[in-house]
Amino acid sequence: MSKSKKVWIPACIALVAAIILVVCYYVYAPSKGEFHPRIPQGGNGGLPPGGGHPPERGDEGPLAGYFSTFGTIALFVGAASFSWLWFKKKRKSPSMLVRQSGKLFYSIHKLLGWATFILVAAHGIYFLFTKINDEHIYSGLAGFAILLALAGYGYFINKIRNKWMRTVHRTLGVLWVPVLWLHAGGSAFLATAATLAVGGLVYLLDKSANRARQTVQEQ
């Protein structure tokens, strides 16, 4: 491996960790809280002998709704940050709207990225302590492993002169998406759809402006 390509190593480590955690999720999820499902005991539909209540999986706490919302917000903030990719090669677009929007997304890309990281960290830390037995902890940790690497490359992208840094950063961003689908479900699909819609709109605006310019030149 060439020296320049060694920059991929931390990303590969993060991806391997994420894959292991996703495998753990699939092993863990069917049992709803145990790696090996317990055989129900007693004669009361799986309740302990003598009745009572089934074992609790952990109290989420009174702030669970807020921290769950942090995770949802992080999806859309991250989607907005990712949307900069659509404008990256359109900075000289004949469409003024595309050019101006591109400048805006470029100026807030890093801010949105760090906001995503902070929101995900807050979301994850809370549920790691309050809902440790939930199977989604594994998919969440898998996503965070990739996000941590993504943030790291984003931080060093202008500090390390290496042609692969941006490629690794973009690749991690793309590979983060399916893990989010696994972890967050519908909200993640909606955030992805919104990002694709932005990309489609940029394409249409740029194409329309190019056609208009060609028409003017031909007259």
Image: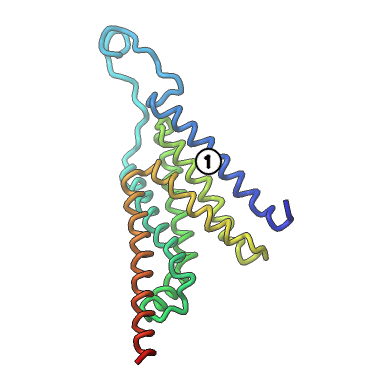
SS state under label 1: helix
Residue 74 pos. (x, y %): 39, 54
Residue 168 pos. (x, y %): 58, 56
- Colouring mode (rainbow / by chain / secondary structure / one colour): rainbow
> In this rendering, is residue 41 above or below 128?
above
Q: Can you tell which quarter of the image residue 193 is in?
A: bottom left
Q: Is residue 101 left or right of residue 143?
A: left
Residue 214 or 71: which is nearer the viewer? Answer: 214
Q: Can you tell which quarter of the image residue 150 is in?
A: bottom right
Residue 30 pos. (x, y %): 38, 26
**Which residue is at 38% across, 12% downward?**
39
Residue 194 pos. (x, y %): 33, 59
> In this rendering, is residue 113 above or below 107?
above
**Which residue is at 36% across, 47% downward?**
67
Residue wearing tag 1:
18
The amino acid pointed to by label 1 is Ala
* Residue farthest toward the front in the current orientation of the protein: 218
